[in-house]
Amino acid sequence: MRDDQAPGRLVIVATIILAAIGIAACQSTPTPPAAAVQSKPPVSGSVAYDADHHVLVLVTPGPGQVAGVMQTWTWDGQRWTRKTPATSPPARRDGLLAYDESRRVTVLHGGQARSGAVNDTWEWDGSNWLPRQPAHAPDPPQQSGSIAYDPVGHRLLLFQWVPRLQADAVQTWSWNGKDWTRLTPAHLPSFVVGTLVFDGQRLALIGGSPDGDRLETWGWSGADWSLLNARHAPITAFLPAAFHAGLHQIVLFGGGPGDDTWTWDGANWARQHPRHSPAATDIRQLVFDKALNRVVALGGLSDGDAITGVYGWDGSDWSAMGAGSPPAVAAGGGVVPASDAVALIRRTVTQTSPILLPQLPAGVNQALVTVDSAGFSLRAWNDDRSTEVSIGIVVPGNSNLGAANKRIAFRRSSAEYQYIASDPRGWRSLWWIERPGHWPVPALKDQTGVPYLLSATSLTEAEFFALANTLR
């Protein structure tokens, strides 16, 4: 498999003016430092759109270790400005940030400080941070959760997973500006890491099923969660998403080879086909900028790392935003026609034999390939990524979370067969050693064969084994 790999001149204006007022007996009083303005993006953190001040708000611990207090930056579509509040929250990573439209403040909750998880709550009014003192607070999370404003309920909603083995490890909380309230929905999503985002009708929660086989979309009624959509698609645990109010749809980035763009209309997901994609493939946050009428994507792997670019989605294409962002690149993430990928594998792998490839199902015509003289991996999809077929020369040993496993007879030998027992069209795979064969990599005790892995999604068991029987 391939993992996709994901600045300008720094201008800092910082002045401290000391004014001596009155006679010598009077003390000098320093004025606050002026804001630092720069075109190059600062380091990554948590982002929300402040609709009252028409800017993005970025809260970051800054570069290096988590210590001191958080930095607060705003972005006006061109330049970043570091704010100088009188009070700032203690430094932390992975803080949850959302704009409360009804109260016109930006809320920061929790995160990971140097001492561990924290569950404090702060509010930004555009010039200063104020600590809140609620009577109740969500438990410190196992890992970062998700927070969003609910325009229907006029409150913030928080979804998180806490370090417990009990059924209440997945929690839903609401914030009304005074206190946190633990909600008790009758139904809960099957995943523990998800993205909260308004979809024009209600808050939606997007995440991957525990087996990694499906993208699930849940809706919040105000009192309970319900499953709105589940589609077969191999995805990561977390995908950034934002609601484009101008187009009335959710925009989601990722889920395919790394640069796929999807939209949700309230009922279904559709893959888009932009000409360009963000040059930074490590997009971890999307936010809608109402003033620009764009969904804005920020590249940067984690808090404390440099933001590698800012990009905007206008409904049909991605483009670089502001100063200091590398230009958008051609979309596709290295995806080529499946026939070209197969020909490349046959032509390049010269030290290993046999080279086995299946006849791909109808419509599976796009591929991502990694290949050298000794081996290869191939991932192929249909247009909307709902069906995937993967094959490669891989050292045995991996397994899929939640998959059943059994040993079966296959190709005059045996194979480890893994599958999702509860899903007739779910993910399934075969691991086997192809013998006789030669693989010049010293990774197996027995060097008399070639280790293969074949997997697929959205195929029934009969369709999967029909695919396996086309191996040539």
Image: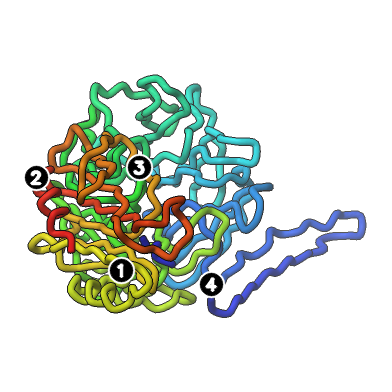
93 or 27: nearer the eye? 93
Secondary structure of the residue carrying tag 3 is loop
- Amino acid marked by disc 3: Ser
Secondary structure of the residue carrying tag 2 is helix
- Amino acid marked by disc 1: Val
Q: Quadrant of the N terminus?
A: bottom left
- Badge 1 crowding class, 10 Å Cα cut-off, few under 14, some 14 to 19, many 20 or more, is many
Q: Where does residue 71 sit, x and y in percent of width and height? A: 59, 54
Q: Where does residue 66 sit, x and y in percent of width and height? A: 64, 48
Measure the C-alpha gap from mark 4 to mark 2: 54 Å
Secondary structure of the residue carrying tag 1 is strand
As displayed, is residue 389 above or below residue 121?
below
Measure the C-alpha gap from mark 3 to mark 4: 42 Å
Whether label 2 touches label 1, CB < 8 Å: no
Q: Which residue is located at x 48 percent, y 23 percent?
A: 136
> Can residue 15 be seen in this snapshot?
yes
Measure the C-alpha gap from mark 2 to mark 3: 21 Å
Measure the C-alpha gap from mark 3 to mark 1: 21 Å
Q: Mark 1 = which residue?
A: 369
Q: Which residue is located at x 24 percent, y 73 percent?
A: 341
Measure the C-alpha gap from mark 2 to mark 1: 26 Å
Decide which of tag 2 and tag 3 comes sooner along the chain. 3
- Amino acid marked by disc 2: Ala
Q: Mark 2 = which residue?
A: 462
- Amino acid marked by disc 4: Lys
